[in-house]
Image: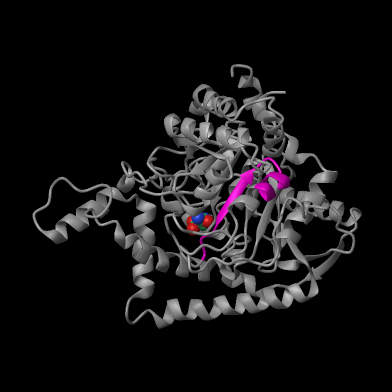
């Protein structure tokens, strides 16, 4: 079996048994990147020297016989908005094109301390704003199942790289679905932890009250093993929390007898593509056969989620992105005469259209005169969602739905109809507004051969319950083991 066909846990096992070294695992990933990434554009950069240093460090830790993560030695792709010391961390934006992070994000530091190897920087929508990975200043990412379709976004590079076997597993970020939705479009497993579970220190902020670092991998076991490494409270992020549970990989019993799976009426039927609805309903049947009990639910409040999300996310983004002014970081306009002109030109030339649109929208909803009508109203409705979910989780343990109402759109289709693109976030944004853990697992294909994803949400802090439900599903199905034909054809070159 090729190295890149292994799951992260299997690869970690081989490294521990000395069948393979950490530097060899890294070279396999780097080789796949060099041989095949021109097909997908999943990476924005692959700086091999720092990755080789990290792999050497990992091997030294392994050789010292220290007890390490089961993933010690495994290479991990990093989304381009998570800081890796001395490496380019550009948010796929012209404004940060030459920016090298002077420090490691806490999640990255934890990877290195546990002997994992940050390897390669993954493409994304500019500043994580988007659902298609088409707004990157490095060009669009392609879906490994069909090059004419998007991989989803904003962590589209991470999902495509895992699907195309150019990467074993990856860290992404999820503000409104950016881990779960690309995972679903690319047929891989993606997990967004509860808000606060993973430190955001070093994750370049989009919407700080919504952002969370998450994992993309071959299966739930890999996501759980990665989460074991990166979770935990951090003095550098005042919103991070140590929840009482820990040991996610160890908690995957696969037993879901008696698990109550809520099935919201609002997430099925109108607006959901027929193939998607059918695949997700078939997945519910599987869960039931595995011992779960299906509980019909009504979540009328989720119709507020998209408007509330786009008000709050853009408001926070307009404030977070004010630091990119042409003075402190990155790109500076060449021609200016006044200070005002320096700011305006640097930002107009440095940011892409989608980012500028969101900054304007966010500035508008926060402006005096409109603040109460939009921002404050959205905050109140956010509380309605939080309360609604708390009530729902009194009646069920997890909530199941499609990840997205459709499979991956064709390239270009979403940018020509942005409202439709925003509306397609309907099933993913509620988890961010309420701080809930959310998992995306592959559950089949539509008639075009594009992957469909099942989403499982849990109460805040119930990450283990969600992961275990997804693991139970993967024990009785093999959708997560399918691989795109394309990458199979070329895998022999590596
Ligand atoms: N598609 C959503 C947006 O454009 C979510 C993005 C994300 O989670 N980073 O804001």
Looking at the image, residue 419 sits to the left or right of residue 100; the answer is: right
The image shows residue 117 at horizontal and vertical percentages of 54, 38
The image shows residue 8 at horizontal and vertical percentages of 67, 38
Tell me which residue sits at (80%, 54%) in the image: 281
Looking at the image, residue 225 sits to the left or right of residue 260; the answer is: left
In this rendering, the answer to whether 286 lies above or below 77 is below
Q: Nearer the viewer, residue 237 or 78?
A: 237
User: By what rule are the colours in the image chosen?
Assistant: one colour
In this rendering, the answer to whether 258 lies above or below 1 is below
The boundaries of the magenta stretch are 210-225
Looking at the image, residue 333 sits to the left or right of residue 408; the answer is: left
Residue 166 in the magenta stretch? The answer is no
Q: Nearer the viewer, residue 250 or 336?
A: 250
Q: Is residue 162 visible?
A: yes
Q: Residue furthest left?
A: 337
Of the 4 image quadrants, the one containing the C terminus is top right
Q: Residue furthest top?
A: 493
In this rendering, the answer to whether 328 lies above or below 364 is above
Tell me which corner region of the image, top left, top right, bottom left or bottom right, holds residue 343.
bottom left
Tell me which corner region of the image, top left, top right, bottom left or bottom right, holds residue 144.
top right
Q: Is residue 143 visible?
A: no
């Amino acid at each position: 079996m090729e190295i890149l066909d292994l799951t992260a846990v299997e690869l970690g096992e081989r490294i521990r048994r000395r069948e393979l070294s950490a530097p060899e695992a890294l070279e396999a990933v780097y080789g796949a990147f060099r041989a095949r990434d021109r097909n997908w554009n999943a990476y924005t950069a692959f700086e091999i020297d720092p990755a080789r240093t990290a792999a050497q460090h990992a091997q030294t830790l392994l050789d010292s016989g220290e007890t390490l993560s089961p993933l010690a030695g495994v290479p991990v792709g990093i989304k381009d908005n998570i800081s890796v010391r001395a490496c380019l961390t550009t948010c796929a934006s012209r404004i940060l094109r030459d920016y090298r992070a002077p420090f490691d994000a806490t999640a990255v530091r934890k990877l290195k301390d546990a002997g994992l190897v940050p390897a390669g920087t993954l493409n994304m929508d500019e500043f994580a704003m988007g659902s298609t990975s088409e707004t990157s200043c490095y060009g669009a990412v392609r879906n490994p199942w069909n090059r004419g379709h998007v991989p989803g976004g904003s962590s589209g590079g991470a999902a495509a790289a895992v699907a195309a076997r150019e990467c074993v597993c990856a860290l992404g970020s999820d503000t409104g679905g950016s881990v779960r939705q690309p995972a679903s479009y690319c047929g891989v497993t993606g997990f967004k932890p509860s808000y606060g579970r993973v430190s955001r220190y070093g994750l370049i902020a989009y919407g700080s009250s919504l952002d969370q670092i998450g994992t993309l991998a071959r299966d739930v076991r890999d996501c759980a093993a990665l989460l074991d490494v990166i979770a935990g409270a951090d003095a550098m992020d005042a919103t991070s929390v140590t929840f009482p549970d820990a040991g996610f990989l160890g908690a995957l019993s696969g037993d879901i007898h008696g698990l109550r799976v809520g099935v919201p009426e609002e997430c099925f039927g109108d607006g959901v593509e027929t193939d998607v609805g059918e695949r997700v309903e078939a997945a519910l049947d599987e869960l039931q056969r595995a011992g779960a009990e299906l509980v019909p639910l009504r979540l009328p409040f989720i119709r507020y989620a998209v408007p509330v999300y786009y008000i709050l996310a853009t408001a926070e983004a307009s404030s977070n992105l004010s630091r990119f002014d042409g003075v402190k970081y990155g790109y500076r306009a060449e021609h200016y005469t006044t200070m005002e002109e320096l700011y305006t030109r640097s930002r107009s030339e440095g940011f892409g259209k989608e980012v500028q649109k969101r900054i304007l929208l966010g500035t508008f909803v926060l402006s005096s005169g409109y603040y109460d009508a939009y921002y404050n109203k959205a905050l109140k409705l956010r509380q309605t969602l939080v309360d609604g979910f708390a009530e729902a989780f009194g009646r069920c343990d997890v909530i199941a739905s499609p990840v997205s109402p459709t499979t991956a759109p064709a390239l270009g289709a979403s940018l020509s109809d942005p409202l439709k693109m925003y509306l397609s976030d309907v099933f993913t944004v509620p988890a961010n507004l309420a701080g809930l853990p959310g998992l995306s697992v592959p559950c089949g294909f539509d008639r075009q051969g594009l992957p469909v994803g099942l989403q499982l949400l849990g109460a805040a802090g119930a990450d283990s319950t969600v992961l275990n439900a997804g693991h139970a599903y993967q024990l009785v199905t093999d959708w997560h083991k399918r691989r795109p034909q394309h990458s199979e054809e070329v895998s022999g070159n590596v």
